[in-house]
Amino acid sequence: MRFLSCYDQVCLIAYCLILYLHLVLSPNHVAFASTEAEALLQWKASILNQTLNNLTSWSYLPSNTKENASPCFWAGISCNTAGSVRRITLPVLVYKLGTLREFSFLSFPNLEYLDLSMNKLFDAIPPQISFLSKLVYLHLSFNQLNGSIPTSLGNMTNLTNLYLGVNELSGTIPKYIGNLKSLLALGLSDNQLSGSIPTILGDLTSLTCKEKGYGRDGVKRGK
């Protein structure tokens, strides 16, 4: 077995460092950082009560330009090794946050985890949410979201956890949720949903945690 000399070890470390810097400073990394940072700031600008929000870290540092700013160290944001946002988890707020209308879903091609629960979001869930094609975890419970559950959720086939409970959603449960074959947990209770539970949901064999009840509309809860 051949042991590396001190010189060889230094060269190996230097080579690894160069590869790391090349990855971090690559055009793709900068492109992700710039596009995603702009999208987050655009959504932040639409949030109500700007003076009260806990997103003060969502801003460009004086030493940064829009071209090299990265959101990876902003509150509630985590990135993958390529510098693209993979996780958004906002802190719980005690006032009305705003809507998802200005959230640019298409700007986050690598987002896997989105938790905006307990932030008093209102208005409808945009159908464009299905642009988050890599999303596996979506938690929008304990808000004031209304309107119907978008049928486009049925296109988010990587979802394993879907929580929409304790909102003001109405209409029926889209049968297209039956397309989510990887789903492990589904929460829809305490809304204003009506109608029956689509029988196709019974084909989701991986589903181990399911809320059958509808809540406020008086439809009988499942056990």
Image: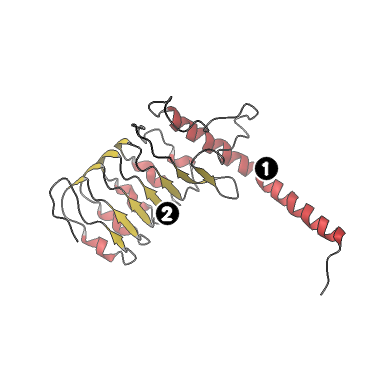
Residue placed most toward the observer, 118 or 11: 118
Residue at image location 27% in from the left, 46% down from the top: 149
Residue at image location 29% in from the left, 59% down from the top: 178
Q: Amino acid at mark 2?
A: Val
**Are the residues flagged by discs 1 and 2 in contact, CB closer than 8 Å?**
no
Which element carries disc 1, helix, strand or loop?
loop
Mark 2 nearby-residue class (10 Å; few <14, some 14–19, many ≥20): some
The image quadrant where one finds the C terminus is bottom left
Q: Quadrant of residue 210?
A: bottom left
Q: Does the rendering let one see residue 132?
A: no
Question: In the image, 120: left or right of 63?
Answer: left
Mark 1 nearby-residue class (10 Å; few <14, some 14–19, many ≥20): some
* Residue topped by disc 1: 25
Q: Amino acid at mark 1?
A: Leu
> What is the x, y in percent for residue 65?
62, 29
First in sequence: mark 1 or mark 2? 1
Which element carries disc 2, helix, strand or loop?
loop
Q: CA distance from mark 1 to mark 2?
A: 28 Å
Residue placed most toward the observer, 178 or 138: 138
* Residue topped by disc 2: 136
Q: Quadrant of residue 211?
A: bottom left
> What is the x, y in percent for residue 130?
38, 47
